[in-house]
Amino acid sequence: MRVSILTREYPPFIYGGAGVHVGQLVPQLRKFVDSVDVQAMGEPREGATAHPETFPPGANAALRTVGTDVAMTAATPEVDVVHAHTWYACFSGILTKHFQDIPLVVTAHSLEPDRPWKVEQLGGGYRVSSWVEKTAYAEADAVIAVSAAMIQNIQNAYPFVERERIHVVKNGIDPEEFKPDHNTDVIESLGVDLNKPIVTFVGRITRQKGMIHLVRAAQMFDPDTQLLLLAGAPDTPEIAAEFDKAFGELNAVRSGVTWVQEMLPRASVRQVLTHSTVFACPSIYEPLGIVNLEAMACETPVVASAVGGIPEVVVDGETGLLVPYDPKRAGDAAFIANFEREFADKVNRITRDPELGKAMGKAGRERCIAEFSWEKIAQETVAVYEAAIAHHAAAKK
């Protein structure tokens, strides 16, 4: 079997979970198929054919993405299956499916209808991205959901996708890459006090990641608890300004808040996670959440919102604590205030009980090793390819 992977991100240039997923999946897939071609966007890099997002120059970001998708299709060699990751690569997936007359597999890392705030970022491009994604799901011979929770999300967004076309293949973690690192050079360079509790967030400054809620909750953390934010790449100037304001308000009422805006190497993040007392994930939308797996693999307990696939990763009371969140009540000020208060309470529960945090951390790593192996995920993905090939053949009869 010959496979082509279509993706925006590919190591070493990754910024989100989809990029981590592809980077980990490709080498494992090569154990089970004849060849894996990778078409990616952005800077040249080893292991992939890269296409800069420059056409048409000066256009809306969504239009530049679609232009790059055409170049990706033109460069894709003759293969048996094409596999598109995120809407960024979906247009190329559609074109390649028809150009080569082969099955299309799409992985649902997220869904455009569930991220309406992206209109702030893309403007009219959001309508383009939504149309591309909807068309890809209609055309796909198989759709991969990265969590069981995503099945219902997919069918809510795209009710024309039959259940038999949806296959659950969860994200994973490499426990040899993310494991406890007890060195202190990186964490000390960030200026935090290793003798006091550290609550860490890693991610982009987006509506999705709920950073505003975390910064507000931090006002209710115990006085000696520190907050370390490894956060950059705001989606829009407006989101950046909103976060800057909230960060300033937090700094005005408490000490021990550190904001690292540059993206740290993954090895450095591993050390930071190891020395963190709690990893905080206040996302308001998260199909699965690889970053929680990374924290758990470093033996760090997680406090997270109970949305999307997060409860399939973080076992409440065992590997961390979950905080209920209802996206439908995002405009309810009282509900949001209570969510932020409960988030702070659960962080404080762990920071006040080091033995509880240690036990949760150990259980988290054990869960990562037992349930989220990339080799297992690659085998499950190949099975989806086989189902897609069968579906494509049947559709042609």
Image: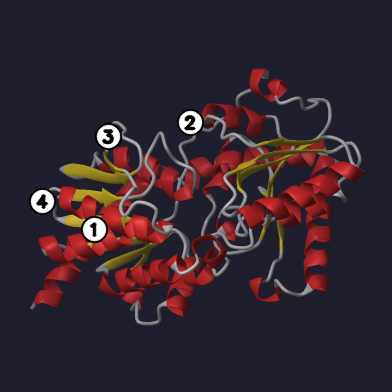
On the image, the x and y values in percent for residue 177 come to 48, 31
- Which comes sooner in the sequence, label 3 or label 1? 3
- Amino acid type, callout 3: Gly
Tell me the residue at 78%/63% (across/down): 339
The residue identified by callout 4 is 78
Q: Choose between 44 and 364: the one closer to the eye.
A: 44
Label 1 is placed on what type of residue?
Answer: Tyr
The Cα atoms of the two marked residues, 2 and 4, are separated by: 33 Å
Task: Tell me if mark 4 has few (under 14), some (14-19) or many (20+) residues whose alpha carbon lies within 10 angstroms of its own.
Answer: some
Question: Residue 89: image x %, image y %?
Answer: 32, 56
**Hey, which residue is sitting farthest left in the picture?**
397
Q: CA distance from mark 3 to mark 1?
A: 21 Å
Closest to the camera, between mark 2 and mark 4, is 4
For discs 4 and 1, the disc positioned in front in the rendered view:
4
Disc 3/disc 2 C-alpha distance (Å): 19 Å
Of badges 3 and 1, nearer the viewer stands: 3
Q: Amino acid at mark 2?
A: Glu
> How far across and down, in percent of the image, does residue 373 sit?
42, 43
Quadrant hosting residue 260: top right
Q: The C terminus appears in which quarter of the rendering?
A: bottom left
Q: Compute the Cα span from label 4 to label 1.
A: 16 Å
190 with respect to 254 (left or right): left
Q: For numbered disc 4, what is the local secondary structure?
A: loop
Location of mark 1 (residue): 385
Residue 134 visible:
yes
Is the Cβ of the residue at disc 4 closer than 8 Å to that at disc 1? no
Look at 81% across and 45% down and name the residue there.
Answer: 248
Contact, mark 3 vs mark 1 (Cβ under 8 Å): no
Considering only order in the chain, which callout, 1 or 4, is on the residue closer to the N terminus? 4
